[in-house]
Amino acid sequence: MHGLDVRCTSGLVPIAVSHRFSQTMSLCDSVGAEPCVKARSTMPVLVVPGGFTRPSSFARLAERLNAVVVTLRRRRIAQLDLGGLTSLAKSLDAAITATPDDGTPLVLVGHSMGGLLTYRASLTHRLDGQVLLMPAPPRGLASDIAGLVARDPVSALKLAALSVSALPARVGRMKPPSGLFTMDATAQVIQESRVHRADESFTALLQLIVGSREPVQKALIPTLVVGATQDGLVPPPRVRQLAEQLGADHLELDVAHNFAEEPAGVVVDDAVEKWLRARSLLAT
């Protein structure tokens, strides 16, 4: 079995993971660097980030769950990665495949686009649980994006600009589109979030909008779907609908889409940990 290549550029010793994460890791990351890990406790929980997002965005949640944040690898010029979601899913497949079936629960926690990738992975891999956080719906976001254009054209234009390049959001003064952060998010929180922005594949973004015509399949494993009341990208009714289609547990919390990047989002961390522990899917 091939190991999962995990590289570190910020001072910790790099390791290769070739088993079901009998040493679970915590993430550390720096600007322009691959994530690095260090050994912690035993439990394979994989966090799958969404679009436009570096793994560093989920450092707090990964630390809370003793989890590994999967790096969704893209081409050097990410916008031109024509493989789209299929290409991004290969990184998740590799992480799952690197964890042999030794009886230890394997749980995926996916956010936004990562939530969609998590759902798709549950159809082809043996998982023991999944958590979908503000997930992009399998049937697409076309109507939601159309609604955003009508409701808040400025935010829609900002998202369009972000799809061309994340540079203005990372180093410029462009304020984030509404609904990514809560109304109470401070200027400091938004400024500190800029380091987490990343370019995204045009093909993947188009696939997120168009979606798939295949019906959503009922979840065969414990599933939690979490919506955000202040989410301007994946509206709460869309998340609620997906939870019903999956037959999943559903929570709606007073946060925004990028919950992991502001203090208010700790309520999501709390809820996810509580749900996993209640189902014996998280190490004590």
Image: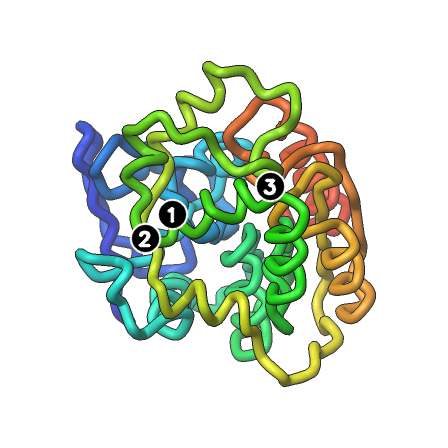
| Vertical comparison of 135 with 209: above or below | above
Viewer-nearest residue: 106 or 203? 203
Image location (x, y in percent) of residue 103: 56, 64
Image color mode:
rainbow
In 3D space, how far apart are the residues under numbered discs 2 and 1 (Cα atoms)?
Answer: 5 Å
Image location (x, y in percent) of residue 226: 71, 48
Mark 3 or mark 2, whichever is nearer to me: 2
Indicate the quadrant containing the N terminus: top left, top right, bottom left or bottom right: bottom left
Q: Secondary structure at mark 1?
A: helix
Going by the numbered disc 3, the residue's amino acid type is His
Viewer-nearest residue: 157 or 266? 157
Identify the residue under disc 3: 257
Q: Is residue 201 left or right of residue 274?
A: left
Image location (x, y in percent) of residue 86: 39, 74
Are the residues tagged 2 and 1 within 8 Å (C-beta)? yes
Q: Secondary structure at mark 3?
A: loop
In 3D space, how far apart are the residues under numbered discs 3 and 2 (Cα atoms)?
Answer: 20 Å
Image location (x, y in percent) of residue 228: 71, 42
Identify the residue under disc 2: 164
Q: Secondary structure at mark 2?
A: helix
Residue count near mark 2 (Cα–Cα under 10 Å), binned few <14, some 14–19, many ≥20: some
- Res 23 seen here: no
Q: How many marks?
A: 3
Question: Which residue: 62% across, 84% down?
Answer: 213
Going by the numbered disc 2, the residue's amino acid type is Val
Going by the numbered disc 1, the residue's amino acid type is Ala
Viewer-nearest residue: 99 or 27? 27
Residue 33: quadrant of the picture: top left
Residue 215: quadrant of the picture: bottom right
| Vertical comparison of 187 with 123: above or below | above
In 3D space, how far apart are the residues under numbered discs 1 and 3 (Cα atoms)?
Answer: 18 Å
Identify the residue under disc 1: 161
